[in-house]
Image (cartoon, rainbow, N blue to C red):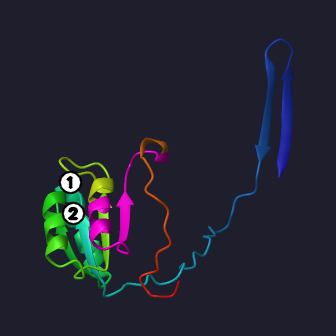
């Protein structure tokens, strides 16, 4: 390494630092964080944006889940009412027209109080009124 400085009164100081060149580039070895576990559970996915429904439907199916999806929360509620035990988990957007995710969840929980529901939102937590806290088992049944 070489270091030099040049002082010019009234003009400032110039510092020059020269580092030795690398003979070859070293890349940090990235270790995989582990394999993503999939499942075989039946998922109801609800979002008013069709692109989100299509993308997440495909993602969940690739992980092995059985997926039924819709852009219409009222339709999702009708499917659930028709057979409340057909789904293992519901994943829903919060902000949707005609029936918001928290209202959909409230209706679902009236029918099946221990139903697992994941509400997704792009809003801050302070903008969303929290649902009552409750302990639910994991999908795997271990916790």
In the image, residue 121 sits, relative to residue 36, either above or below, namely: above
Q: What element carries label 2?
A: helix
- Residues 8 and 44: in front is 44
Which residue: 23% across, 49% down? Answer: 96
Give how far across and how far down residue 34 sits, in percent: 52, 83
Per the image, is 116 magenta?
Answer: yes
Q: What element carries label 1?
A: loop
The label on residue 53 is 2
Asked if residue 51 is positioned above or below residue 40 in the image, the reply reads above
Residue 8 forms part of the magenta stretch? no
Q: Disc 2, disc 1: CB below 8 Å?
A: yes
Highlighted range, magenta: 105-125
Which residue is more in the foreground, 18 or 94? 94
On the image, the x and y values in percent for residue 91 come to 31, 66
One can see residue 29 in this view: yes
Instruction: From the top left corner, tell me how far across and down residue 78 is, in percent.
Output: 13, 67
Q: In this view, does 75 lie to the left or right of 37?
A: left
Q: Name the residue under label 1.
A: 49
Occupied quadrant, residue 33: bottom right
Q: Residue at x 37, y 58 (%)?
A: 120
Count of all numbered marks drawn on residues in the image: 2
Residue at x 76% of width, y 52% of height: 19
Residue 27 versus residue 137 in the image, above or below: above
Along the line of sight, the residue nearer the viewer: 39 or 82 = 82
Please state the horizontal and vertical placement of residue 30, each as a whole percent of the image.
57, 75
The circle drawn on residue 130 is: none
**Spatial CA span between label 2 and label 1:** 6 Å
The quadrant in which residue 52 appears is bottom left
Q: In this view, does 78 lie to the left or right of 114?
A: left
């Amino acid at each position: 390494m070489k270091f030099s400085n040049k002082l010019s009164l009234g003009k400032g100081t110039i510092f020059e630092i020269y580092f030795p060149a690398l003979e070859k580039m070293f890349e940090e070895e990235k270790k995989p964080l582990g394999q993503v576990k999939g499942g075989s559970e039946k998922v109801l996915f609800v979002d008013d944006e069709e692109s989100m429904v299509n993308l997440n439907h495909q993602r969940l199916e690739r992980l092995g889940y059985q997926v039924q999806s819709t852009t219409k929360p009222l339709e999702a509620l009708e499917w659930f009412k028709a057979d409340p035990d057909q789904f293992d988990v519901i994943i829903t957007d919060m902000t949707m027209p005609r029936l918001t995710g928290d209202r959909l969840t409230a209706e679902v929980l009236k029918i099946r109080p221990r139903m697992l529901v994941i509400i997704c939102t792009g809003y801050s937590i302070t903008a969303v009124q929290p649902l009552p806290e409750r302990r639910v088992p994991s999908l795997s049944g271990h916790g």
